[in-house]
Amino acid sequence: MKKSHISVMNRSFQVLDQRRRKLLKDHETLKLKERVQGIRAYSMDHLEELLEEAARNLEENGVEVIMAGNGEEARGAILDQLEGEVLVAKSKSNTAGEILLSEHLEEEGVEVLETDLGDRIVQMHRESRPSHPIGPAAHLDLEMISRIVSDYLDKEVDCEPRSILEAVKEDILMELPNIRVGITGANSVAASDGALLMVHNEGNISMISLLDVHIILVGIDKVVSTLEDAVSVVKLETIYATGKKTPAYMNVVSSPSKTADIEQELLKDMYGARRVVVVFLDNGRRELLQEGAESLWCIGCGSCIVNCPVYSVTGPEFGYRRHLGGRGVVMSRYIEDEATCTDSGLFKCTLCGNCTRECPLEIPTSQIMELLRRECVEEGLHIQEHRVILDNIKKRGSAYRD
Ligand code: SF4
């Protein structure tokens, strides 16, 4: 990432950090944090049964459920659901980023319209990658954004936030009537209700859920017991991610659009989606869970990268695709392999533990990194500089040459 982008990103992170600090110490937040830790621990201990329950209840509610073992299966399944469409609308989704869904769809001739403002700006830019899971354009300042949007739309957009918002919104709304299929992620899945919970501030997921087909791609780790648990999870995520107590919108999707307003006869396909398809993605998550690593407890707030000394210097190069920072490095070991984990920054981590202190779930990322380093070294995946130091120690009993 360019130096200029890094400094803008660090400034945005500082603002975010100041905004949320007071709220993080609030008694209610601390109680919620404890509750969510219990919810996530239970979910991880009972993942298979909760997943089975979620799939069963979703199907009873009329939702189509697909289980995908890896990214390729998920991408193939999603492509199959597009019914020949060549333009789809999409909301922000780290899971879609994990499997390079947009890139794959575009290779297959399907254009993807990002509907989240930050994501759309990054999509227009092409040169940069999202820098925060909730605020993907945190590395771009006003001037950069106005230039990107002006270039993309081929018209002069004033260097002023409202003008930029209006220009991007107009462009998206012009395309939307031509789109039948929407793709979103989900923040949490409630097993006993057969329902998915999505949070957003812009209203874009509400629009997508009204398209003819709504495809929801979600990691199997997002499942919790009840809708009440799911709400607790997303409330805590919102506090840590944005410094606000509640998001503007929480959408619950538990079935395709329906009504029973005429003599109690159930009729489908009113205003919302005619079909809702949920794709549950494993992609290494079961293996990670079997290894006992706590990385799947993550609720996706992005708090771990805000004060990470490595991320503050490198940006998204430290991490794996849309899983940013140290946790992303850990995920890459299970999504891909040890070599990818090494390339994602395994040996860059300072092991300072800031990410654990900042994480509402207290995920011990630095400890997991240490274990992974041992594993990678045993596989011969040293970085060259470390190899030299190791050889020096073996030969001379000192890290130095002389
Ligand atoms: S332990 Fe590693 S990943 Fe965590 S904050 Fe420190 S440098 Fe970043």
Image (cartoon, rainbow, N blue to C red):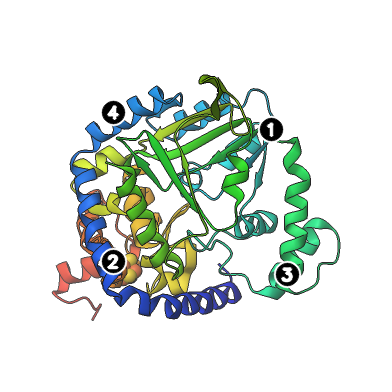
Whether label 1 lies within 8 Å of ligand 1 gets the answer no
Q: Percent from the top left, x then y, of residue 299?
A: 35, 54
Report helix, strand or loop for mark 1.
loop
Whether label 3 lies within 8 Å of ligand 1 gets the answer no
Whether label 2 lies within 8 Å of ligand 1 gets the answer no
Amino acid type, callout 1? Gly
Find disc 3 in the rendering and name its residue. Answer: 162
Between 63 and 158, the residue placed more toward the observer is 63
Find disc 4 in the rendering and name its residue. Answer: 52
Against 19, residue 164 (above or below) is: above
Q: Earlier in the sequence, mark 4 or mark 1?
A: 4
Q: Local crowd at mark 2 within 10 Å, few (<14), some, or many (≥20)?
A: few
Against 215, residue 342 (above or below) is: below
Find disc 1 in the rendering and name its residue. Answer: 109
* Residue located 56% across and 68% down the image: 138
What is the distance, in whole Å, between disc 2 and disc 1 at their CAs?
44 Å
Image disc number at residue 6: none
